[in-house]
Amino acid sequence: MFSQNYAISEIPEELKKDANAVIRNYSSEYLIKAADNMEINEKKVISILNKAGEKYSYAYISYNKYSRISDVKLKVFNEFGKLIKTYSKSDLNDISQSDDSYLYSDYRALASRIIQPVYPYTIELTYTVKTSDTAFLPELQPFLSANVSVENWSVGFTNESGINLRKKITDTSFGKVEVSESGNNLVATYKNIPAYQVEKYAPDPETIFPKIEFALDKACLKEKCGDFSSWQSLAKWYSSLIEPVSVITPEIQNEINGLNLTGSTSEKVKKIYQYMQKKTRYVFVGIGIGGWQPMVADEVRKKAYGDCKALTNYMRVLLKAAGIPSYYAKIYMDNTPMKFDENFPKMGGNHVILYIPTEEGDIWLENTSQNIAFNHLGYSTRNRNVVLIDDKMTKVVNTPTYKSEDSEEKMRFAAQISEDNSLSGTFKFAFTGGLYDFQLGKMSMTSEELKNSLKEDFNFLNFSEINYDNLNNDRDNGKLSFDINFKANNFSKALGNDIYFRALPVADSGFYLENSENRKFPVEVAFGFTDDYEIEYSIPKNYKFTELPLAKKIDSEYGNYSMEFSQKDDKIIVKRKFQLNKGIIPVDKISSYIKFRKQINNIDATKILITKI
């Protein structure tokens, strides 16, 4: 039994360290009566220690038309655990969970923000939910945010349904779960988890904190019930949601016939895909089977918009009309890769893409962008897996990975050093792989927005003039390129009659971490990349080069780096290549990684000296 003494003095000192708030007790009790009948009793108790913790003082209860909220009680206690205020359900605001990015959504919430003038204080929220949805059982993971500690976080099940309740435990060095089971009852608890602080370059905490997951072998979502005991049966159930909205109408068939498709399967898919991209745009739609069933394909045809589900399914139906099989694929789209467990089937994923196996190789399509290249997945959907949704062929399949050499920034730079310390010339850039993804937003910018974006990208140069040219998105090969013509002031520096300037006109490698002392989290290199720079400086006629800097080279388990210099007439040519490997660097290796990156930063800061004749 968890104590209900909410005095701040009762919080262990180790849980106050680095904490702006403390989760005193977060307990969820699930009574599973049948595949379509579940009751949840929630209790959330959080102590707000200071103003920085005030953002956790929200009372927020999500619901939809398939759930009923009752017995809402909200209490506020002072520092000494004395009750100072109470609220009921009628005191909370009934709000939509939609925002400006949503076109439609049937998600709602009861919400209120509790602000007390004196810190610390404690909020207790209790309520009951009755629902017919059992497809999503909780994933218990004992973290809310940085600088929030956990005293007690638990979930309990009383399973009267006769349906098998599965669990999956992932323990880490950041905590271990306590599980007790007796008959139809199960309780899982995390206790005394200290607050963590934000650490630069750390992975998403969700990927490194412990967790316990739950799933029923048979479950329901918005009155649609099915067998979730295997990926095959789960996908067959999911397919039953998709097929009714995937009818090839005469109008859709006419669309395909009008494209006059010829050539290989890959060529046909590309033509259909680029037709779909040109015609449609992305808008979030969160209605229909809890936001898990796509819009009707013919509605997407008529309206020319949809969310990831709708656009992916529309593309799938277009391919089907052309006699080309493809697979609706659920995926986790996050910066740090999250994967489905092949041995633990459960509802999940936050995005949908399309998979097309062909005789020429696999094709992967991201259907929400009007600009992205054919058969190109962004960095946030590569290097993970998908669940293919089909009633005949269902499995978990890996998406492509980015190798370091696949994500390349190629820069060719020619510029004139002037005696007034200005620099003028041309950058020529080309980006592929994950670096293409980062640059793709430029294709949607106005001319003025693009200029401002370039100024921000190269804010280390003091531009007096900047113009871009030859902006090109090669959607066949996943390559984005553009040129910049510019003049920048105060690039070089006077040293008596001499002039010196940086060998690298752009910023250094961008990594800044002084040490790994007291570090708790590893460092994540989210994806590898390659920089390939060739820089040509012309100097004033009445100047000459002094001794050229020496070539430098570094080979490491983390990547490779080289910079070399050569002279041709009144020009100096600098070649720099940096390849960084993707990966997670454990705490005990971070110091050597810092050394590697500092070496690169130091070489990037190399200066070139020219002397007046």
Image: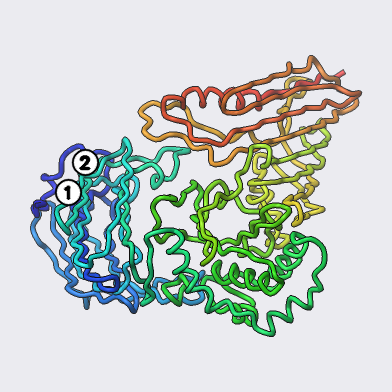
Amino acid, disc 2: Leu
Badge 1 local density, few (<14 within 10 Å), some, or many (20+)?
few
The secondary structure type at the circle numbered 1 is strand
Quarter where residue 248 is shown: bottom right
Say which residue appears at 25% left-offset and 73% top-offset. 37
Residue 44 visible in the shown view: no
Q: Which amino acid does label 1 sit on?
A: Ser
Circle 2 — which element?
helix
Mark 2 and mark 1: Cα distance apart in space: 24 Å
Residue 552 drawn at (x, y percent): 69, 19
Q: Is residue 83 visible?
A: yes
Q: Where is residue 380 in the image (x, y as percent from the top left)?
A: 55, 51
Q: Mark 2 points at which residue?
A: 15
Task: Give the image location of residue 576, x and y in percent.
Answer: 72, 29
Residue at position x 46%, y 59% in the image: 349
Residue occupied by mark 1: 180
As drawn, 94 above or below 600: below
